[in-house]
Image: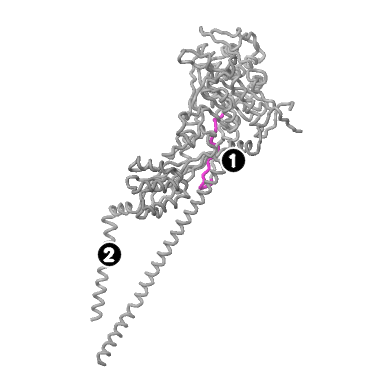
Amino acid sequence: MMVRIKERLFEIKLEIKLFLRFLPLSIILFVMGGFLIIYNIHYIKVDNEIVRTSQNILAIQENILNLKKEKSKLISPKIVESRAKEELNMVDVNLEKVRFLVNE
Amino acid sequence: MNERRIIFVSFLFIIGFFIIIFRLVDLQTRDKEILEELIKKQYIREEKVILPRGAIYDSNGNILAISIPKLTVFAIPKYIKDKEKVSEELSKILKISKENILRKLEKHKSYVVISDSVDKSLKKEIEALRYRLKEWNIGLLDNSKRIYPFDELAGSTIGFVNKITGKGAEGLEYKYNSILGGGLKKIRFIADATGKPLHIIDTLDNISQSKDIVLTIDSNIQHIAEEVLNRYVKLRKPKGALILIVDPNTGDIVANATYPNYNPNRYWKYKIRKNITFQNAYEPGSLAKPFVLAKAIESRNIDLEKKYFCEWGKIVIDNVRIKDHTPFGELTVRDIIVHSSNVGIIKIALEENPKELYDLFFKLGFGKSTGTFPGETSGKLRRNYLPVNVAYLSIGQSWTASPIQIAMAYSSIANGGLLLKPRILKKVIDKKTGKIEENKPTVIRRVFRRETTDILKGVLLDVVEKGTAKRGKSKFYTIAGKTGTAQKYDPELKRLSTEKYYTWFAGFFPVTNPKYTIVILFDEPQKIGEKEKIGGGSVSAPILRDLVDRIMFYKKIKPDKSGN
């Protein structure tokens, strides 16, 4: 029984020795793999961020364009004139009654 | 034993790696193209989109045309499982009637656009609807819609963009297609299994090459011109009419109001989309007379007080009888222009060298397109030195000119003798680089001496103050110009009509320092009263009264007439 245990211990010692011999290589492979995975996760994250930011920029640009359009509609001479007449009760200038007060 | 096992396992691993590497090399070399195509089919989609175009601004920086990003919602009806439900749900989002959508889905089988002007803010809602109903054959496309915020203001000049091709189809939109960009383009994007874009490869920003343009049009003056024109169109019911305002010092087209006009936002609803300022030519009638006088001043320094007998309104040349609108006896050279005597000006013209007289008209730009607008006419002016043709040349009959040619010719009188190229494009702005390209005014040639134009200005001022255009004179500003009336040819009667006319006014103001050249034309205006005599003086000149003061007040230019 003791002999068998000794033999087994010897085998385990040998396996540990062998394992220790390949350990640095395993660590290198593990670190490299880990690095690649982390890099990939980071890359995807940054890519998503870029896509989201570009979409936000586009959305803001679209908003600006829409606001520009709305502003242009509001300052259209036709709209300004109709609002001045309808909302502020302004009337067309009677050119016959215009007098210039210029002292130059 | 253990070492052997490890070597064996390692060997298996190495073989496995080699197989994988071999397969990778094999995939990337031998079947590369087939596989790439497969990937493209599976993941990369291509869709046609309308690219955004550059904006069009007026001279004050107001937007006249702008491209707004929109969405096109389409469907492939034959694969839609529940058309009723899809119509109902889409109608709630798009605010289009359910019946309308359902009709489209039932009428078409393969591809139908449900709406091409959907606000981009609705994108998420529509995508959610696709997922909820599992209707993958409802699609969304980026799109761009051309909007003209001022509606019909300068519509016939700006033109429009075809909503299917995304390219300018008429007017300045067409002329400046290469600068404004736009059009249809395929964009590529990587999509998931449901077709939803994950990553757009060609963004619209990358493929769109558009620049903004700034026009010389002033939208406020344009509005004034259109309002006045519309008022007189209601009164006179002509076939066509226009008010063209140009800066005589730069050739800038400041306003171009035309009738008929159209709203470029709904261009497809209009049958006539011509811009008569550039695309039509008319007989100028008496507008030609000041140029004959200019020739007489330059060639022989004709005395304005020299008298000509005007034959009591009738003259026969080469057996052709030409009449005056009113019989005149003796008239001075000045009065021949002021009262617009055909007989008088024909006599002056016949004393000139006919070749040199024609040379002057060609030098003024008649008979040649100015190249400002797409489809622009050249007018019709051909040399023929027979006395009757010289007579017709001098009274503006049997040859034609476009209103823009008339405006530039009168601008040459206003600016001291220079013929300028009309300018409607002021600047080109590259949004990406911020670079601004100025389109500078172009002097084509000198056509008159300054002294000649000074004399002409005095004569043309008299036309408005006491001559045929006196109904248009302003209380505040001096206006110089000439009325014109040309009889239209009646194809039914096969002769010149006594009922149908072109009525003109061409001139500039203020005379002391001309700021604007103006051309007013009515094609077949109707009489207001039975006894009214249709002519440039009765139809076109009165418009000046409503126009000049408003424009000058808007520009805050001091009156140049004394007594105010």
Q: Chain of mark 2?
A: B
Q: Which residue has dot 1 on it? A: A75
> Which image quarter is the C terminus of chain B in?
top right
Q: Say which element carries label 1.
A: loop
Give the crowd class for mark 2: few <14, some 14-19, many >=20 residues within 10 Å: few
Give the crowd class for mark 1: few <14, some 14-19, many >=20 residues within 10 Å: some
B18 over B231 or under it: above or below:
below
Q: Alpha carbon of mark 1 to alpha carbon of mark 2: how far?
A: 68 Å
Q: Which residue has dot 2 on it? A: B20
Q: Amino acid at mark 1?
A: Ile
- Percent across and percent down for residue B359 are 53, 20
Residues indicated by labels 1 and 2 sit on the same polypeptide chain? no
Q: Amino acid at mark 2?
A: Ile
First to last magenta residue range? B420-434
B162 over B6 or under it: above or below:
above
Q: Is residue A2 left or right of residue B176?
A: left
Q: Which mark is residue B112?
A: none
**What residue appears at the point 41 percent right and 39 percent down from the top-left corner?**
B164
Q: Quadrant of residue A29?
A: bottom left
**For the residues bearing labels 1 and 2, Cβ distance under 8 angstroms:** no
Residue B355 seen: no
